[in-house]
Amino acid sequence: MKATINKLFAYINLSKGEEDKNIVLDNVKSNISFRGSNLWILACAIVVASIGLNVNSTAVIIGAMLISPLMGPIIGAGFGLGVYDFNLLKKSLKNLLIATVVGLLVSAIYFYISPFKEAQPELLSRTSPNIYDILIAFFGGLVGAIAITRVEKGNPIPGVAIATALMPPLCTAGYGLALGSLKFFFGAMYLYSINCVFICISTFFIVKFLKYPVKKQLDDKHQKQVRYIITTLITVLILPSIYFAYQLIEQKKYQHQVAVFMENEFTNKGIAILYKKTNFNSKPKKLQLGVLSKRFSDEEINVLNQKLKTYDINDTKLVVLQDTTDLKSDILNEINSNQSVLSKKDVTILKLKNQISQNRYDNKALLAEVKILFPEIENISLSNHTFDENTDSTRTVPVLIYKSKEGIEKPSEEKLVLWLKQRLVKNEIEIFRAPRNIPKPDLQKKK
C-alpha cells in the first residue's frame, strides 16, 4: 500500500524537474521591468492587437498575445507576494501599472485615428466577463507558474499567454476611451483585472506549494493581513463574475427556447425567417422576426405571442416585421452590419420567390373546380396582368381566359367572376373567352 502511494506521489510531484529556486527568482526579477525594448515591444503588440480587434481577426490577436511581455510583472507580483519580498511586489505592481497605462494610451490613440469605429464581435466578447474567465485566468496562471519553475520551460508559456488573454481586454478598454464608452472601458478593465489578479494569486499558491524561501518572516498578524487582502480581492472579483455567468447561462437557455419556437412555429410550417434579433436586456424582452413569404394578421401575431409562454419564453414581446413592396429598414440595417441570418443575395432570392408565389395560380386545380360549377368550360388559363392606366400608376389584376364551345351566358359569367373573387380573395377579376382558333392554353406556363 505504501509503495502504491509513493508511486502515485511520484507522478504528481512538482519538485521533479524543478529549476534552482534562486535562478527562477532571478529570471522573474529580470522580466518585470518595462524600459527600453520591453516598452517598445509592448507598444507594438498593443497596436497589433488593436488592429486584430478592429478587423475582427482572431489570428492577429493571437499573434499579439504571443509577443506581449505583460505576463512578466504579474508573475513577479505573485512571486513577491509568495516569498514576502515586498520590494519585488511593489516593483512588479509599478511596472504593471506603467504597462497598463501605456497599453491604454496606445490603443486609445489607434482607435481614435482609425476610420473603422464599429464594434466587432472580438471587441464585444471582452466587455462581459464571468466566472469562466476567472477559472481560465486561475488555471492558466497555475500552468504558467509551474512552467517558469521548470528546468525545461517547454510549450506551456505561449499557451498561457493565449488562454489568459491580457492584451485584448486592455485594447478594448482603449477602444472605450477613444469612443467615450464607459461600458466598453469598465467591462474590459474588469476582465483585465480578473486576469491579472488571478494569475498573480495562482502564482502565489505555486510559490507556497513549492516552498520557496521567504525573504522576510512575517508574524501571525501580518500573515493574516496578507490572507485578508487576497480573500478580499478574490471576493470582490468573483461575486460580479458569478452574476454575469448566471446572466450568460440564462441568455443561452433563452436563445435555445427561441430557436425551438422558431423551428416549430415558422420553419416547420414552411415560413422562411429572413432575420432574427433578440433584446434580452429590455423590459419586456423583445424578439423581432422578419419574414417574406407570409403576411400575419394582428390576431395571428397575438396567438404567437401567447404561444411564447408554452415554450417557456416569458416576459417577451414578439414583433413580426413583414414585407410589402420593400424590405423594412431594420432588416436592411441588420444585413449591412453583418448580423443578419441571411446575406443580401439570399434576401433577393426570397423576395423574388415571394413575388412569384403571389403571381402563381394552380390552373389545374382551378379547372377541376370550375368544371363542377360550369361544365361548359373546357379549359382555363389564369395569371396576373399589369394594366397601364396612362398615368403614373399601374394596376395588377388576375385575368382568366376560358375556352368553351358555345361560350357562357352573361349571368353565368357574372357568377363565375363572383366565385373567382371569393375563391382567390381578390377585389377585381377580368375574364375573357379564348377564340376557337388559338392553341390550347398551356396550363404549365405562367405569365
Image (spheres, rainbow, N blue to C red):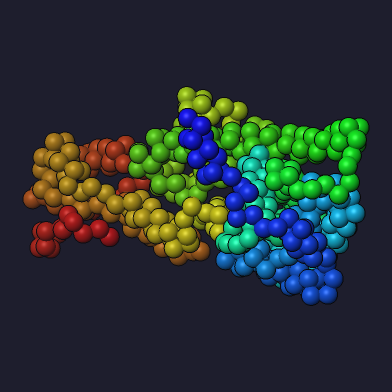
Q: Residue at x 74, y 34 (%)?
A: 239
Toward which corner of the image does residue 372 lie, by quadrant?
Answer: top left
The number of discs equals 0
Is the C terminus in the top left, top right, bottom left or bottom right quadrant?
bottom left
Q: Nearer the viewer, residue 399 or 389?
A: 399
- Relative vertical location of residue 283 with respect to residue 31 in this rendering, above or below: above
Q: Is 421 on the left or on the right of 375, as rendered?
A: right
Q: Position of residue 79 (x, y in %)?
A: 78, 51
- Relative vertical location of residue 257 with respect to residue 137 in this rendering, above or below: above
Q: Is 188 on the left or on the right of 401, as rendered?
A: right
Q: Is residue 70 visible?
A: no
Q: Residue at x 14, y 41 (%)?
A: 368
Q: Position of residue 385 (x, y in %)?
A: 33, 58
Q: Nearer the viewer, residue 153 or 396?
A: 153
- Relative vertical location of residue 52 with respect to residue 14 in this rendering, above or below: below
Q: Position of residue 141 (x, y in %)?
A: 67, 50
Q: Nearer the viewer, residue 278 or 179?
A: 179
Q: Nearer the viewer, residue 118 or 444?
A: 118
* Residue placed furthest toward the left: 405
Q: Is residue 237 visible?
A: yes
Q: Is 62 on the left or on the right of 103, as rendered?
A: left
Q: Residue at x 70, y 38 (%)?
A: 241
Q: Position of residue 215 (x, y in %)?
A: 86, 49
